[in-house]
Amino acid sequence: MAAASRPDLQERLAVQTANRERENLLRRVRTIDHADGPWLEIGGKRLLSFCSNDYLGLAQHPQLISALRSAASECGVGSTSAHLISGHRTGHAELEEALAVWTGRERALLFSTGYMANLGVLQALLARGDICVQDKLNHACLLDGAKLSGAELKRYPHADVDAAARQLTCSENAGVLLATDGVFSMDGDVAPLRKLAALCAHENATLMVDDAHGLGVLGSHGAGSVEAAGLNQYDVPVLMATLGKALGCAGAFIAGSHSLIEGLVQFARPYIYTTAMPPALAAAALVGVQLAQADTWRREKLSALIARFRHGAAQLGLTLSSSTTAIQPIVLGDAQAALDAANTLEWRGLLVTAIRPPTVPAGSARLRITLSAAHEEAHIDKLLSALEALHLRPASR
């Protein structure tokens, strides 16, 4: 091919962006000027937010802020190096130990983001010729991790354990890992973890759970969907969760056996070749872990708010998913309908995100409502009143 006939990569990207805008699917960045609990200021407007993942209301907790300030005063801002060079500080080690104890695992390993954690563990565990079986609604980083590993990716219909079983049984001569979200980020429902664990035990497959939206929220001690399902390290050998949602900080971790973590230290490239998270952030996250366990009232309050919202939505005739978690989507189907609804809610002082393809499947654009222990009953009632005024016609599911 002559050089002159090569495609212009930026021009191609511009065409793709224009196509997305024409289909009402263009994403836009919005700058938050100030945050005060569930209240956000954007461009001079004060909005009540229902699109944050701060499920326990810890992101602005004074104890987390104090811990971060104190650690930053003592050891500075950046860790200055990768964990394996000179970036691993006492705060990191203490946080890893606390996370391991909380989740009932032998060890835990910190990553800078959940995306990096999933890429790292899947790339380290899987190789060409192996098979990775995943729920079709898994988060993008699980899918990307499987693709980058070189393993064959097989996807089963959402929460369909029988379909997952068929994919496992036809893979007798390959190493197999089954990966699933614990709580699905766009639908809010919980994976059938007990059935998946039994299936993996029967088929000698490794089960991995991404519990980004379950940690801190589910389980008697807040240890997540795996704890809530009554499963342990042997049932779910690979557990990933994040620090940037219910714990109000940033970062992520993988928890499991000593041999798993030691193997990741040796072979997980996103861990090896990345600067460690700031030690001050680790100190704040450690306080978040402690509060998530001690302040049981946060989960109790969140549960009561979820029940209040679902009861009120039912009285309005709104069709909700089966979610009993903080994620409460209202599926409208059409992307423009979701955008219009979100814009009207914002005009009424509420910030609710319209989620559109390709984040969700085509024809399932939605309002993704998320609740927090930082909300009050009056906030829920304000949201319900605004939703009633929209006269929504949810899509059939």
Image (cartoon, grey):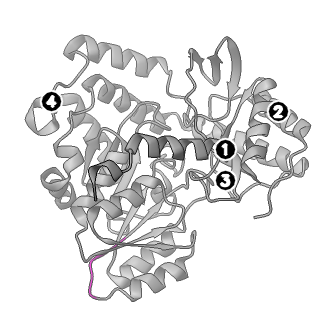
Q: Is residue 188 left or right of residue 397?
A: left
Residue type at mark 4: give it: Ser
Residue type at mark 3: give it: Thr
Q: Is residue 63 left or right of residue 146?
A: right
Q: What residue appears at the point 39 percent right and 77 percent down from the top-left corner?
A: 200
| Image location (x, y in percent) of residue 396 | 80, 63
- The image quarter containing residue 104 is bottom left
| 376 or 335: nearer the viewer | 335
The label shown at residue 217 is: none
Q: Which residue is mark 2?
A: 381
Q: CA distance from mark 4 to mark 2?
A: 48 Å
Q: Which residue is mark 1?
A: 22
Work out whether mark 2 precedes mark 1 in sequence or the reverse, and give the earlier one.
Answer: 1
Quick check: marks 4 and 3 in contact, CB under 8 Å?
no
Work out whether mark 2 precedes mark 3 in sequence or the reverse, and give the earlier one.
Answer: 3
Q: Which residue is mark 4?
A: 81
Residue type at mark 2: give it: Asp
Mark 3: secondary structure: loop
Which residue extends farthest left? 85
The nearer-to-camera label among 2 and 1 is: 1
Q: CA distance from mark 4 to mark 3?
A: 41 Å
Q: CA distance from mark 2 to mark 1?
A: 35 Å
Q: CA distance from mark 4 to mark 1?
A: 44 Å
Q: Residues within 10 Å of mark 1 (few under 14, many from 20)?
A: few
- Name above or below for residue 56 compared with residue 117: above
Work out whether mark 4 precedes mark 3 in sequence or the reverse, and give the earlier one.
Answer: 4
Q: Is residue 12 left or right of residue 46?
A: left
| 253 or 218: nearer the viewer | 253
| Magenta segment boundaries in residue numbering | 173-177
